[in-house]
Image (tube, rainbow, N blue to C red):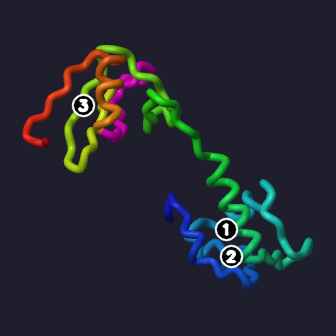
């Protein structure tokens, strides 16, 4: 089973049974039943439960939008904690990249794993002064 759902495979103007929708999206039937309990609208209240493709796409888009988190100016999203974290000074480094970008690498103060964020070279001096690391340009100018 897939972890990421491809909602583009669902046709907007078609109605699906729960088992059909589960097969198309690549999840279990129980997952679709759980979505129905969480607010996925059905056309009928009796079996077979029919779900419009448009309703599923709207439900899926609203779930994706609710799970997004905006990062602050000097925050990095930690994939282990699943939260934006502010780096601690001294635990930050950078790696130059091509195209006027750099990768900021930090050690998460909460879980002590590495996290990274790509920033523009225009903002790199602000990051360097705030988190006390040296800017190194090894052949990327």
Of the residues under marks 2 and 3, which one precedes in the sequence? Answer: 2
Residue 95 at x, y percent in the picture? 21, 35
**In which quadrant of the rendered image does the C terminus lie?**
top left
- Residue at 38 percent across and 16 percent down: it is 88
Q: Would you name the residue on which mark 3 appears?
A: 94
Residue 17's quadrant in the figure? bottom right
Mark 1, secondary structure of its residue: helix
Residues shaded magenta: 107-120
Q: Is residue 14 magenta?
A: no
Residue 116's quadrant in the figure? top left
Of the residues under marks 3 and 1, which one precedes in the sequence? Answer: 1
On screen, residue 117 above or below 106: below
Q: Is residue 109 magenta?
A: yes
On screen, residue 136 above or below 7: above
Residue 80 at x, y percent in the picture? 44, 35
Q: Would you name the residue on which mark 2 appears?
A: 19
On screen, residue 93 above or below 64: above
- Residue at 70 percent across and 65 percent down: it is 32
Viewed as shown, does residue 28 lie left or right of 96? right
Is there a contact, CB below 8 Å, between mark 2 and mark 3? no
Of the residues under marks 2 and 1, which one precedes in the sequence? Answer: 2
Q: Would you name the residue on which mark 1 appears?
A: 29
Mark 3, secondary structure of its residue: strand
Front in this rendered view, residue 42 or 107: 107
Residue 62 at x, y percent in the picture? 70, 56
Which-is-in-front pick, marks 3 and 1? 3
Mark 2, secondary structure of its residue: helix
Q: CA distance from mark 2 to mark 1?
A: 6 Å
């Amino acid at each position: 089973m897939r972890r990421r759902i491809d909602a583009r495979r669902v046709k907007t103007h078609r109605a699906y049974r729960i088992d059909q929708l589960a097969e198309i999206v690549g999840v279990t039937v129980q997952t679709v039943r759980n979505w129905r309990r969480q607010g996925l609208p059905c056309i009928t209240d009796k079996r077979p439960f029919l779900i419009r493709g448009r309703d599923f796409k709207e439900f899926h888009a609203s779930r994706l939008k609710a799970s997004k988190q905006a990062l602050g100016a000097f925050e990095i999203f930690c994939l282990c904690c699943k939260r934006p974290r502010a780096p601690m000074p001294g635990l930050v480094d950078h790696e130059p990249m091509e195209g006027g970008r750099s990768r900021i690498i930090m050690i998460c103060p909460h879980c002590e794993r590495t996290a990274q964020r790509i920033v523009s070279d225009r903002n790199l001096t602000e990051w360097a002064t705030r988190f006390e690391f040296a800017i190194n340009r090894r052949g990327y100018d």
